[in-house]
Image (tube, rainbow, N blue to C red):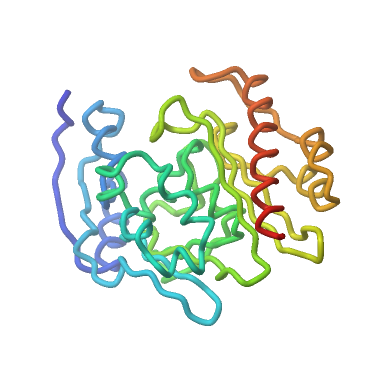
Amino acid sequence: MKPAPFAYKKVRSPEEAVALLTSQADARLLAGGQSLIATLNMRLSAPSLLIDINGISGLDGIAVKDGTVTIGALTRHAQAERSDIIAKHAPLIARAMPHIAHPAIRNRGTIGGSIAFADPAAELPACLLALGGEVEAHGPKGARRIKAGDFFTDLYETALGASEVLTAIRVLAATAETRTGFAELARRHGDYAIVGLAATARGKGKGLADVRLAFFGIGNTPLRARKAEAALESGDVEAAVAALDLEPHDDIQATGAEKKHLAGVLLRRVAKQLMEARA
């Protein structure tokens, strides 16, 4: 299929994009386009205007400053995958990058696009949640920051306002005590995950503290398993599996019961990663 007719405008600043979004309610932003173009061609989206933000300078960098890693919204997945800064200071994201789709998609897809699209089976939203990160957005009232726990609100829905542009994400830089783990199960490498898990923790003596388990592919948004987090901090992996407070829904890939079983499988694998990193 071909997309419905639309107008096209390339902008040079966030302010210009915000002005167009404000004046045209059904406009859509175009960054990497790896999800948007598919929905246009299937006519699941039919905006009257596409606003191309690729001409905005300064939105494609990766930097670490004052203990915080900032990733510009237009940073391509492939840039993050190759980044020494990401590898050293945001190792959870480095673990996740090879699982995202395929090289051709990672060459064009953007970090900001993945976060803003908020696919519940995508890796990066779960990583942002596990890292306790935040999103920077630019809107009619200027810039604001939104915590990851408040950002993902429902299926493909976020706290971004209709006239806001996501400009960056920020996460705390890893320290010597930081522990990370990542695993997912998919029918083929590069497919969306049936179930996935992104995790962070802080090494504390022979144990773990501040465990954050962010599951994806099991609900309308990435979800933390807080009871399992507390159990894992006690050092009992099987207790953490038994405490998984998840109610996955059925979908075309698996039943909710199968997903909950697989969540336990991944929790055991990721717990091992966290423990081995601690040793």
Q: Position of residue 76 (x, y in %)?
A: 31, 56
Nearer to me, 263 or 125? 263
Would residue 33 appear left or right of 206 to someone viewing this image?
Answer: left
Would residue 167 appear left or right of 213 to someone viewing this image?
Answer: left
Q: Name the quadrant of the C terminus.
A: bottom right
Identify the image quadrant of residue 142. Answer: bottom left
Nearer to me, 188 or 33? 188
Nearer to me, 147 or 198? 198
Residue located at (57% from left, 46% from top): 182
Which residue is the extreme one toward the bottom?
A: 66
Q: Name the quadrant of the N terminus.
A: top left
Identify the image quadrant of residue 264. Answer: top right
- Count the labels in the image: 0
Q: Position of residue 198 (x, y in %)?
A: 58, 47
Would residue 243 appear left or right of 198 to someone viewing this image?
Answer: right
Residue located at (51% from left, 52% from top): 159
Q: Position of residue 122 (x, y in %)?
A: 46, 41
Q: Position of residue 175 (x, y in %)?
A: 62, 72
Residue 214 vertical position relative to residue 187 in the rendered view, above or below: below
Residue located at (22% from left, 53% from top): 51
